Image (spheres, rainbow, N blue to C red):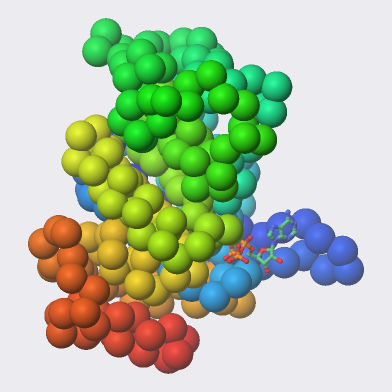
Amino acid sequence: MNISIQDLSHTYDALPAPIEALSSVSLQIPSGQFAALIGPSGCGKSTVLRLLAGLLKPNCGMIYLDDFPPPRAIAQKRVAWMAQSPALLPWKTARDNIELAQRVNPQPRRNSLSSDELLNLVDLADFADVYPFSLSGGMQQRVALARSLALNASVWLMDEPFASLDELTRESLAFEVIRLWHIFRVTVLWVTHNIYESVRLADRIMVMSPRPGHIHADIEVPLSRPRDETSTEFLAIVKQIRAALKAE
Ligand SMILES: Nc1ncnc2c1ncn2[C@@H]1O[C@H](COP(=O)(O)OP(=O)(O)OP(=O)(O)O)[C@@H](O)[C@H]1O
Ligand SMILES: [Mg+2]
């Protein structure tokens, strides 16, 4: 699914004065691309994702997911949104959390995977009957990932899903996400604060600047996967992003 944003601006009604969160953001993400959005706190990353997920209505500008405005794409369950907190239902087991997502999906595809197959994909086959409080933070995020996969969506909007996890867990989940992205061939927009994570994951990294938020740089990552984080090429892109963040 292609993502297309044209001239998007958004101002929040706030006291004592409105807050201009985004100004004239335009971007195109072709179907199947893994794109990252990086920028300092408060620059408007989550606002872009909330607008794409149809949770907010833009003041100005156009958003299309293929030929659909967000509410239509969401209604067809073609968009999965994942936030920093896994937000699992604590009274349901890992399997039941996933099956709930499957039940609310009004258009299950013919080749939909079962909850056990999804748990297997995120390496939690042995934890199907376990409740969230008995799972580690990384395991809970993997259940949330499986729950997003249960929607069979064509777009994944990921708002710093690993921000609360330690570096080692983030790295291993990044491999997991890339593996799943290869299997499902979805379009991903991944929000992060973490420069290394963005280069580890994405085909392309958009750098946002604040007050009001706009895309300041758009950097290609022409590296094959898996990526060697100590290679000169990897570190050169890290440097390029750091420079773009400083030059805002
Ligand atoms: N519900 C809201 N009401 C009013 N202002 C808001 C609201 N949500 C966000 N803002 C403002 O919009 C701007 C962008 O916020 P947003 O949450 O999109 O930033 P962000 O880049 O995701 O930050 P972070 O990295 O800290 O998550 C900020 O100035 C914030 O104060
Ligand atoms: Mg945010």
In this rendering, would 42 be left or right of 197? right
Viewport quadrant of the N terminus: top left
Q: Quadrant of ligand 2?
A: bottom right
Q: Position of residue 6 (x, y in %)?
A: 40, 55
Residue at the extreme right of the image, as rendered: 16
Residue name at image x 50 percent, y 77 percent: 209
In this orientation, which residue lies closer to the viewer: 136 or 53? 136
Q: In the image, what residue occupies the spot 22% across and 60% down?
A: 203
Q: Is residue 24 visible?
A: no
Q: How many marks?
A: 0
Position in image of residue 76 (x %, y %): 43, 20
Say which residue appears at 35% left-offset and 54% top-offset. 172
Where residue 201 appears, x then y in whole percent? Answer: 29, 59
Out of 11 and 160, give the one closest to the viewer.
160
In the rendered view, would you say 63 is above or below 128?
below
Judge left or right: residue 152 versus residue 110: right
* Depicted 207 relative to depicted 191: above or below: below
Check the image and report above or below for 248 versus 84: below
Picture quadrant where residue 120 is located: top left
